[in-house]
Amino acid sequence: MNNADLFFNSAKVIKEFPEILQEVQEYISNKYSTLLSDNPEEQKEQIKSYISKYLLDYHLGVKDLNFEELVEKLYSEMAEFSFITKYLFRNDVEEININQWKDIKITYSNGQILPTKEKFNSPEHALDVIRRLLHKSGMILDNSQPVVRGHLSNKIRITVFGNGVVDQDKGISASIRIVNPQKLDREDFIKNETVTEDMLDFLSASLRYGLSMCATGATSSGKTTLMSYLLSTIPDDKRIFTIENGTREFDLVKLDEKGNVINNVVHTVTRYSEDKRQNIDQEKLLESALTANPDYICVAEMKGGESFAAQEAARTGHAVITTTHANSCEATYYRMVTLCKMKYDINDDTLYNLVTEAFPIVLFTKKLEDNTRKIMEITECEILPDGKRQIYTLFRYNIKENKIVDGKLRIIGEYEKVNNISKSLQKRLLENGMPLNMLENLLKAGEA
């Protein structure tokens, strides 16, 4: 305990936190003009010193908070974003869901969803904090714009529903998704039973030798983490061009011991502008990427007009890896057709033929009820000599049993190799430089 705590505890006037907050805010507002430093850290310390002085001068305290805790809470409330601040910058938090002013749930990277111990003081308090959060990024929430979507930074996405869309007595509803990219290596995927060695080897070898593929599944099913690993297995002399929407999750640059870059990667991210001429979306980045001599193109997510350009790139010799949201491997192609029609009104059958040619390999990822992530299925779409398409399963995860162990659900299953890739894809891999012995090993792997 420091001297401030000793003095603080010796004779303090206990008040409610909102009351002390209002007093301190009025005091600090008269002191802002004396803040000398433009350095954020120095300014933070100056503000905290003013808060500390006021509390000590008037012996103010709050029940169950020591001196340092009270100073931190007041600072966070005034200069930051209340108790939400500490969750925004944690590495183990994936999402902050504010259902209403007194109901906040945190989704952690281990799959747990837990309520916060803290809550806002009132509906108005919740609204004030979220407005401050949006203001940092130039977004405004008011009666004319009761729904706001955007990015607080290149790592944080936010969607807010305000008064007029949610009940006034609830204050606010918001979903804040925090991108904390997980870098997993081969052993991590296998240890977590997300995929087998044979499946992982098949996917990395297929991408390496030019087969375009799409990972599909719901949000948080592990698509991006898997795609990042597959791209990390590409030889260092091959040029990789990544395209992401608003938030950058990939970090594929490799450095040697001296800090020199040893691979060949270009990371790009979209830039939104209300002026359409200044707006840079995924489609525009993809068009530019094709002029940058890439060996591999990664479109982080297909969800609009860029889908047509992505399939065009894949059909013209580029290896393209991407993701989208669908409920199965087979449904992925119909999802692609729908997305492509946002760009061009082309016959569905024609588009289906284009996307199945572009992405012969599809993998379906899923976060199961026990919070484990699995590649549930890998399929190939084979183009038959008469032009018809045939989708068949290469690998799949079979669920055998769901049972409760120590009060928690546990899903029991096993992976199965169902088929080898078609003769036509085998031929393409050989033409793209895959050594014959590697192909033979891929075909033998996983067989009983």
Image (spheres, rainbow, N blue to C red):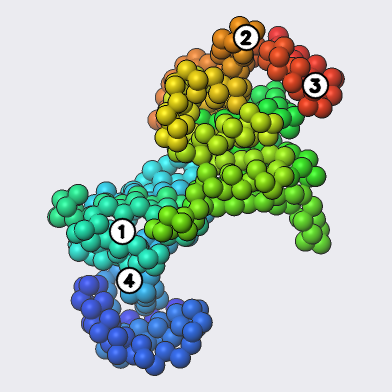
Residue 182: mark in rendering: none
Which type of secondary structure does the marked residue at label 4 adopt? helix
Residue under label 4, please give it.
Answer: 77
Q: Is residue 61 above or below residue 241?
A: below
Q: Are marks 1 and 2 in contact (CB under 8 Å)?
A: no
Q: CA distance from mark 1 to mark 3?
A: 59 Å
Residue depicted at x 19% and y 59%: 143
**Neighbour tally class for label 1: few under 14, some 14-19, many 20 plus, Cα within 10 Å:** few
Residue under label 3, please give it.
Answer: 430
Quadrant where the C terminus sits is top right
Q: CA distance from mark 1 to mark 2?
A: 60 Å
Q: CA distance from mark 2 to mark 4?
A: 64 Å
Would residue 132 appear left or right of 272 to someone viewing this image? left
Q: CA distance from mark 4 to mark 1?
A: 13 Å
Which type of secondary structure does the marked residue at label 1 adopt? loop
Q: Amino acid at mark 1?
A: Glu
Look at the image and tell me whether residue 374 can be seen. Answer: no
